[in-house]
Image (cartoon, rainbow, N blue to C red):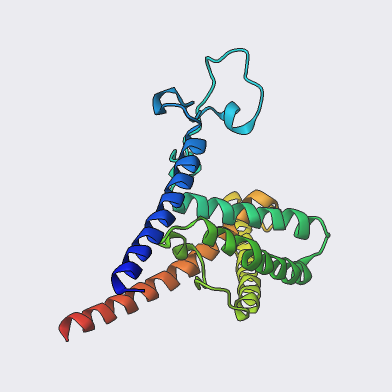
Amino acid sequence: MSKKKKKNDKESTIENYYDLKVDKVDELVAALKGDKPSEEREQISMKISDCTGEEEKKSKKHEKEFDPYKVDKLSRVPAWLKAIFIKFWFAGAVCYFIMMGTGLQDFDAIIVTGVVLGVIVDVLVNPCFGYMQSDRREFDKYIMLPFPFKKYWTFFVNIIYYVAILFLVNYCYLGINLMCNAIAGTEMNYYVGVEPLLFGVLTTIVDMFFIGIKDLIVYLVKRKKRDKSENV
């Protein structure tokens, strides 16, 4: 067989091969289109009832449309407000369930409540901040140990840290009682008891005081490194 004949057979084979594939592609395109012009095809509905499969409401006046790019209201709340509220709420909850619920007194109450609060912060509060923050890491300013990945030793450090915080909160209560009695002119007759709201406020204030010191140190160290790199 000559080279010319082989070349012709090869071209004929390739041509037939692609003819078959083109037919299949045409069938697939026709099936996907449904043999309907693009203007007659049903448009995708953005109504919540159509997306979820729920029955349509009788009144369509207040029916909302689904917007995947809509910014929710919670994301508009400033990061500092969300962080302070979460810290306050969890501290108050630990006070209610542990300090008041168990009936512990004095030293035992401080130790047990501090341990539980440290566990709650490490297991729930800090991961919650990590979930909410963006690439700017705006919640790092409200965490004592803001590591981007999990460190097991932070669990024990947070326990020790919050036990120390609880001791300072106890002194805050003593200071408030002394101040109130000094103003009233009595000798320790006025007593401010422990309850979740004031406990949450005092714990958050003391906690943020030390976290603020940490943030200041981090800022000064970063500024010093930046100044060094600029001078080089």
Asked which quadrant contains residue 112, the reply is bottom right
List the single residue furthest toward the right: 103
List the single residue furthest toward the left: 231
Asked which quadrant contains residue 214, the reply is bottom left
Q: Is residue 194 visible?
A: no
Q: Nearer the viewer, residue 185 or 174?
A: 174
- Residue 157 pos. (x, y %): 61, 78
What residue is drawn where x is 37% and y is 56%? 15
Q: Is residue 16 visible?
A: yes
- Residue 149 pos. (x, y %): 53, 73
Residue 199 relative to residue 213: left or right: right
**Does 65 appear above or below 72?**
above
List the single residue furthest toward the bottom: 232
**Does 212 appear above or below 151?**
above
Split into 4 quadrants, where in the image is the N terminus? bottom left
**Does 221 appear above or below 53?**
below
Numbered marks: total: 0
What residue is drawn where x is 54% and y is 58%? 131
Residue 21 relative to residue 222: left or right: right
What residue is drawn where x is 54% and y is 65%? 207
- Residue 69 pos. (x, y %): 43, 40
**Does 166 appear above or below 186?**
below
- Residue 101 pos. (x, y %): 81, 55
What residue is drawn where x is 17% and y is 86%? 232
Q: Nearer the viewer, residue 197 or 138?
A: 138
Asked which quadrant contains residue 215, the reply is bottom left
Q: Nearer the viewer, residue 138 or 206?
A: 138
Residue 135 relative to residue 157: left or right: left
